Image (spheres, grey):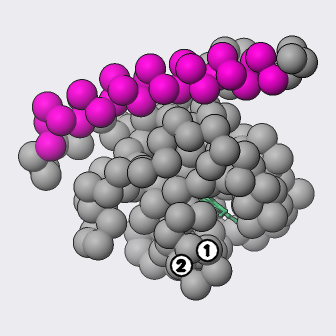
């Protein structure tokens, strides 16, 4: 097995453990006005995730084949702004996107819930309070593809946390 494969396996093992931790955490504090696992500095993370996205969880969490499919989808649909490794440094990040293109792999984004990420991918940023050029993908990606991308994003967060 190549060392790259090994690294990927390790990252998946870690993301799996870490998601399990999250599942417990969410279970404890699922009353709707508790936002303390969202980021405190970015107010838009405090926005309630609307229906029908609210409380959705990723059915493909930790699934390695899903993450691989998500990687290809990310490269096709997201990398031009968010960068090949998700850090907000794609070729279009410095053009007029209506906001700083998010680094999707930092600890803040790693801590965002599945429902928030899924909502933002589906609906984009063309509405308050975001008012950005983050596109809405609900017409171009299936629900399953959005979850595949989220599975891949969790993987990128874990890889980065491992310093890779
Ligand atoms: C045209 C550039 C562009 C493309 C393409 C794009 N995004 Fe974004 N995205 C942005 C900008 C700018 C923001 C920050 C403003 C906002 O939150 O709307 C953002 C924000 C986000 C957020 C919210 C982050 C936060 O801090 O709340 C997520 C999640 C996200 N993008 C995921 C994706 C995914 C996944 C794709 C591909 C399916 C994608 N984006 C494609 C520009 C883009």
C-beta proximity under 8 Å, tags 1 and 2: yes
Residue 150 or residue 45, whichever sits in front = 150
User: In the picture, residue 10 is in which quadrant?
Assistant: top right
What SS does tag 2 mark?
loop
- In the depicted structure, whether residue 50 falls above or below residue 3: below
Mark 1 beta carbon near ligand 1 (under 8 Å): yes
Residue 83 or residue 68, whichever sits in front = 68
Q: Specify the segment rendered in magenta.
A: 5-30
Magenta stretch containing residue 12, yes or no? yes
The percent coordinates of residue 49 (x first, y second) are 30, 61
Q: Does residue 68 appear in the picture of this structure?
A: yes
What SS does tag 1 mark?
loop
Calculate the distance from the C-alpha at mark 1 to the C-alpha at mark 2.
6 Å
Magenta stretch containing residue 64, yes or no? no
Q: Residue placed farthest to the front in the image?
A: 1
Neighbour tally class for label 1: few under 14, some 14-19, many 20 plus, Cα within 10 Å:
some
Question: Residue 141 bears which disc, if any?
Answer: 1
Question: Residue 62 bears which disc, if any?
Answer: none
The percent coordinates of residue 54 (x first, y second) are 27, 61
């Amino acid at each position: 097995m190549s060392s790259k494969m090994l690294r990927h396996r390790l990252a998946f093992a870690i993301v799996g453990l870490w998601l399990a931790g999250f599942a417990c955490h969410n279970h404890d504090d699922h009353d709707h006005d508790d936002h303390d696992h969202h980021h405190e500095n970015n107010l838009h993370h405090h926005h309630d995730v609307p229906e029908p996205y609210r409380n959705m969880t990723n059915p493909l969490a930790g699934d390695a084949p899903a993450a691989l499919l998500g990687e290809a989808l990310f490269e096709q649909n997201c990398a031009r702004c968010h960068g090949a490794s998700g850090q907000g440094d794609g070729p279009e990040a410095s053009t007029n996107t209506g906001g700083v293109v998010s680094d999707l792999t930092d600890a803040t984004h790693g801590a965002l819930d599945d429902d928030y990420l899924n909502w933002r991918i589906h609906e984009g940023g063309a509405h308050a309070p975001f008012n950005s050029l983050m596109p809405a993908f609900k017409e171009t990606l299936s629900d399953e593809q959005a979850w595949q991308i989220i599975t891949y994003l969790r993987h990128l967060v874990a890889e980065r946390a491992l310093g890779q």
